[in-house]
Amino acid sequence: DAKTTQPPSMDCAEGRAANLPCNHSTISGNEYVYWYRQIHSQGPQYIIHGLKNNETNEMASLIITEDRKSSTLILPHATLRDTAVYYCIVRVAPVSSGSARQLTFGSGTQLTVLP
Amino acid sequence: KAGVTQTPRYLIKTRGQQVTLSCSPISGHRSVSWYQQTPGQGLQFLFEYFSETQRNKGNFPGRFSGRQFSNSRSEMNVSTLELGDSALYLCASRVGTGGYSPLHFGNGTRLTVT
């Protein structure tokens, strides 16, 4: 799986958009970009994933550059509850049922939403 | 739909003992994987089960084992506990029908070995 690079920490004002960058310059054509977050004392929470098109769901938007070497997770209106460690992961999708490969989590970005 | 449920939430054991952790996946999810999380090592993959068969295994000693039942529930066992086994143990489930279905994690079992 491709290695990812994220800033160790970021701050964001409550109500503003939080833009979390991730570099994955060695990503290959069949690797997806996944974002998870972990709030203290809880398990990681899935946020969003994508291959090459931009994606949006009720939690966030994922913008992937055309060359796929980097991506940005956007939380449109950050709240205090969005304070967490955000992990960007790239991995190959399993080709068959049950042949899933484990996720490799890096150090992530500690996002602190300030009141 | 209920999320991934892990029991117990907290556990304190002494060195040399063994422990069993339990995980109930999201209804309909057939794949269950286990992770160990420590401040120093981060999140490390232990193993993954699908249809009662271990499909993938991380780099942990044989003291760490697991199994999956026909209802997809899973258990993880650690024998001869060591101080270094103190960690948050996370279980995650996924649909397991191929493609790119994401993992859904439980809130973990916090194991303390004294």
Image (spheres, helix red, strand yellow):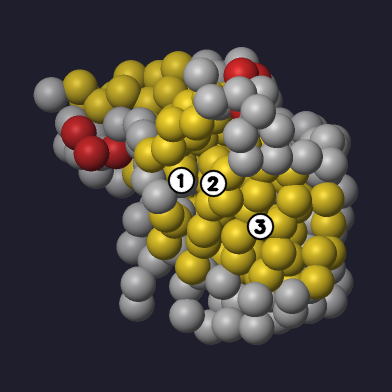
Quick one: label 2 or label 3, which is nearer the N terminus? 3
Element type where label 3 sits in the image: strand
Amino acid type at mark 3: Ser
The residue that appears at 20% across and 22% down in the rendered structure is A114
- Residue behind mark 2: B90
Element type where label 1 sits in the image: loop
Q: Look at the picture and state if A112 lies above or below B97.
A: above
Label 3 to label 1: alpha-carbon separation: 12 Å
- Residue behind mark 1: B108
Pointer 2: residues within 10 angstroms few (<14), some, or many (20+)? many
Amino acid type at mark 1: Gly
Using the image, name the chain to which the residue with label 3 belongs. Answer: B
The residue that appears at 40% across and 50% down in the rendered structure is B8
Same chain letter for marks 2 and 3 = yes
Label 1 to label 2: alpha-carbon separation: 4 Å
Using the image, name the chain to which the residue with label 1 belongs. Answer: B
